[in-house]
Amino acid sequence: MSEKKPKFLHARWKYYKIVGDRVERLRKFCPRCGEGVFLAEHKDRYSCGKCGYTEYK
Ligand SMILES: [Zn+2]
């Protein structure tokens, strides 16, 4: 019987930022396409490359 030592798990929560008592995503999702489609960040706006949604800062 061989026993493997447990490896350290990489923390997934590094993709999130804790702000006060809530969790904030570091990247914005497209409100039209839904979660999984990120908005590309530009200097003055965010835009979705899939549907063309644009959100100004
Ligand atoms: Zn979109």
Image: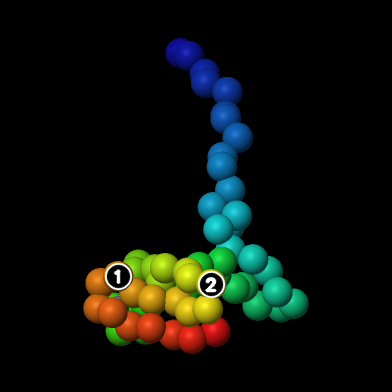
Mark drawn on residue 17: none
Q: Nearer the viewer, residue 54 or 4?
A: 54
Quadrant of res 25: bottom right
Circle nearer the N terminus (2, 1): 2
Instruction: Rate crowding at label 1 as few (under 14), some (14 to 19) or many (20 or more) other CA atoms within 10 Å.
Output: few
Q: Which mark identifies residue 43?
A: 2
- Residue at the disc numbered 1: 49
User: Identity of the amino acid at label 2?
Assistant: Lys
Question: Where in the figure is residue 51, as x and y percent of width and height?
Answer: 25, 78
Q: Residues within 10 Å of mark 2 (few under 14, many from 20)?
A: few
Q: Residue furthest right?
A: 20
Q: Quadrant of the C terminus?
A: bottom right
Q: CA distance from mark 2 to mark 1?
A: 16 Å
Q: Residue at x 58, y 23 (%)?
A: 5
On the image, the x and y values in percent for residue 55 come to 44, 85
Q: Nearer the viewer, mark 2 or mark 1?
A: 2
Q: Quadrant of ligand 1?
A: bottom left
Respond yes or no on whether mark 1 lies under 8 Å from ligand 1.
Answer: yes
x then y, percent, for residue 10: 56, 42
Looking at the image, the residue that sits furthest to the top is 1
Furthest-front residue in view? 43
Residue at (56% x, 40% y) in the render: 9
Q: Is residue 27 left or right of residue 40?
A: right
Residue type highlighted by circle 1: Gly
> Is disc 1 placed on a helix, strand or loop?
loop
Residue 43 is at least partly visible in this image: yes
Q: Is residue 35 visible?
A: no
Q: Residue at x 64, y 66 (%)?
A: 17
